Image (cartoon, coloured by chain):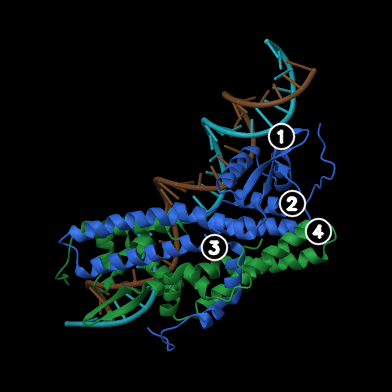
Chain colours: A green, B blue, C brown, D cyan
DNA sequence: CGGCTAGTTCTGTAAGGAGAGAAATTACTA
DNA sequence: TAGTAATTTCTCTCCTTACAGAACTAGCCG
């Protein structure tokens, strides 16, 4: 049997805490606990892990791990890593936090906002031809549509900016304002 | 009995569609369907509505409406509006989309990221004093902590910028980059 | 070509959440 | 102060989802 040499039966406290918190933070947004925990564990691991090790360290069923790993792969938050002389599959996490954020944002956008935008377009079209609908409602649907479209376009542009530069922008915070040619200084509307 | 004069028994198609979509879009993120539907209905309404009207138009139970309205109030996405000669409470939605976005963002941040940041601080402290934890894991926890803290600070700064100006920034998109004094032009990793 | 081992899919169960309807409370009116 | 309208809270049910364990499939060794 292939004993892992530097195997730890119980995780260091800080790691366990991290995994636990990450786990139920995941629960609070769309991802289920197991998926988030596995992700956390891999994120902190200094080497790729296989399904058995994960199951052992987290105490969750193989079936569950299999499905969770599959989900993490579709989010591109982890990747398969072949290990010499071991036919089992190993996995490691994306450790670049910016990548991680954009992957998550991308995934959520695809699942949540894109369909919403599409639906909104339909509503907008519908509203234009419907005589029963009030002017107000029509206006609100339009406003929402424009807003969402603008934000969507913005997001699309932002993720094309190289991370380091974007990070610079973020670190600058509101100082960016001081470099812009502002038409007016008093806060309009 | 207080008949509503301009009462519509069934909603215009576009409105119904909007409500339906908004409803299950809500379901896809943290908010439950009823809450999101009520919000959508109020957003499109040209006048404040009371609980009865809402129940009638959406076909959901009064108890449910009561709870949902309470939740929407805590999110500050709707407000109570007194109506002359009617002792029932009426509600109207925030229609400024920027307000709406910031309120939602604020709420989610409070519930989801603030606790996570707090937990992360604890983990970081723990990791520093734990001899069992690997250098790698400690580094990753630190990296995560710094990243989250930076983003948090950025968010905090952004919401203090007047909406109109922020909107301008967003409409500019990546053009903002051209106004900045960049140290280097080639994309740094 | 049997026996293993890794991995996946299937199935049953248990927990959580949403929401309906009843009961209780509060506020207003006569 | 009784009576009624409006709203909230409580409780019960249904539905969804997470997850464990079992059964199944596929690759690899002798």
Height in image: A159 above or below A65? below
Q: Are marks 2 and 3 on the same chain?
A: yes
The mark lying in front, picked from 1 and 3, is: 3
Residue A188, percent across and down? 65, 63
Query: On the same chain: label 1 and label 3?
Result: yes
Q: Earlier in the sequence, mark 2 or mark 1?
A: 2
Q: Is residue B35 above or below residue B28?
A: above
Q: Residue at x 61, y 71 (%)?
A: B168
Q: Is residue A121 left or right of residue D11?
A: right
In this rendering, position of residue C29 left or right of residue C16:
right
Q: Are marks 4 and 1 in contact (CB under 8 Å)?
A: no
Q: Quadrant of the N terminus of chain B?
A: top right
Q: Tell me if B123 is positioned left or right of A106 in this view.
A: left
Q: Chain of mark 3?
A: B
Same subunit, tags 2 and 1: yes
Q: First in sequence: mark 2 or mark 3?
A: 2
Q: Marks 4 and 1: same chain?
A: no
In whole angstroms, how far apart are the C-alphas of marks 4 and 3? Answer: 32 Å
Of the numbered discs in the image, which one, if any, rests on residue A135?
4
How far apart marks 2 and 3 lie (CA) works out to 30 Å
Which residue has dot 2 on it?
A: B45
Quarter where residue B84 is shown? top right
Badge 2: few (under 14), some or many (20 or more) residues near its Cα, within 10 Å? some
């Amino acid at each position: 049997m292939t004993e892992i040499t530097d195997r730890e039966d119980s995780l260091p406290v800080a790691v366990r805490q991290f995994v636990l918190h990450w786990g139920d933070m995941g629960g609070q947004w769309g991802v289920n606990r197991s998926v988030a925990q596995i992700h956390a564990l891999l994120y902190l691991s200094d080497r790729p892990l296989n399904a058995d090790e994960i199951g052992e360290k987290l105490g969750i069923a193989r079936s569950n791990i299999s499905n969770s790993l599959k989900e993490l792969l579709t989010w591109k938050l982890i990747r398969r890593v072949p290990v010499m002389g071991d036919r089992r599959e190993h996995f490691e996490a994306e450790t670049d936090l910016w990548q991680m954020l954009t992957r998550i944002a991308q995934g959520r956008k695809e699942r949540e906002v894109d369909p919403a935008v599409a639906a909104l377009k339909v509503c907008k079209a519908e509203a234009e031809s419907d005589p029963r609908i009030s002017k107000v409602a029509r206006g609100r649907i339009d406003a929402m549509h424009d807003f969402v479209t603008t934000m969507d376009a913005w997001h699309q542009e932002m993720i094309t900016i190289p991370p380091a530069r974007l990070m610079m922008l973020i670190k600058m915070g509101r100082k960016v304002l001081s470099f812009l040619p502002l038409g007016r200084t008093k806060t309009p509307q």
